[in-house]
Image (spheres, grey):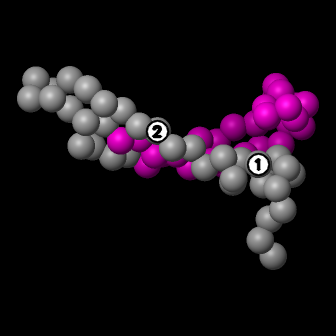
Amino acid sequence: WVITRCIIWATQTSEVMGVKPTNKKVEVGYWNSHRYNKDGLIVESWSLLDNAALMQQLGLLPTKE
């Protein structure tokens, strides 16, 4: 297994989750897990995006105060 953590920086210029473009800048983390076989090929893959953080930055969920 190999696990990576990445961060996406983007500006919302198109509709996301039913929200019209806001031109807000967002920063969202995501994680990937890949299982490789003995030949070094990916045979299983899982991804996880921090949707709650994205929704908070777009104003769809309240933020912690």
Q: Which residue is mark 2?
A: 47
| Highlighted magenta segment, given as a residue range | 5-33
Q: Earlier in the sequence, mark 1 or mark 2?
A: 2
Q: Residue at x 69, y 54 (%)?
A: 53
Label 1 is placed on what type of residue? Met
Q: Is residue 17 left or right of residue 28?
A: right
Q: Residue at x 77, y 71 (%)?
A: 64
Residue 14: give x, y in percent of width and height. 82, 25
Check residue 17 for magenta coloring: yes
Give the x, y percent position of residue 12: 79, 34
The answer for how far apart the CA atoms under marks 1 and 2 are is: 18 Å
Q: Amino acid at mark 2?
A: Ser
| Mark 1 neighbour density, 10 Å: few (under 14) some (14–19) many (20 or more) | some
Q: Secondary structure at mark 1?
A: helix
Residue 56's quadrant in the figure? bottom right
* Label 2 packing within 10 angstroms: few (<14), some (14-19), many (20+): few
Q: Quick one: 15 or 9, which is closer to the camera?
A: 15
Instruction: Determine the secondary structure under disc 2.
Output: strand
Image x and y of residue 63, in percent: 80, 65
Q: Which mark is residue 55?
A: 1
- Of 2 and 11, which appears nearest the observer? 2
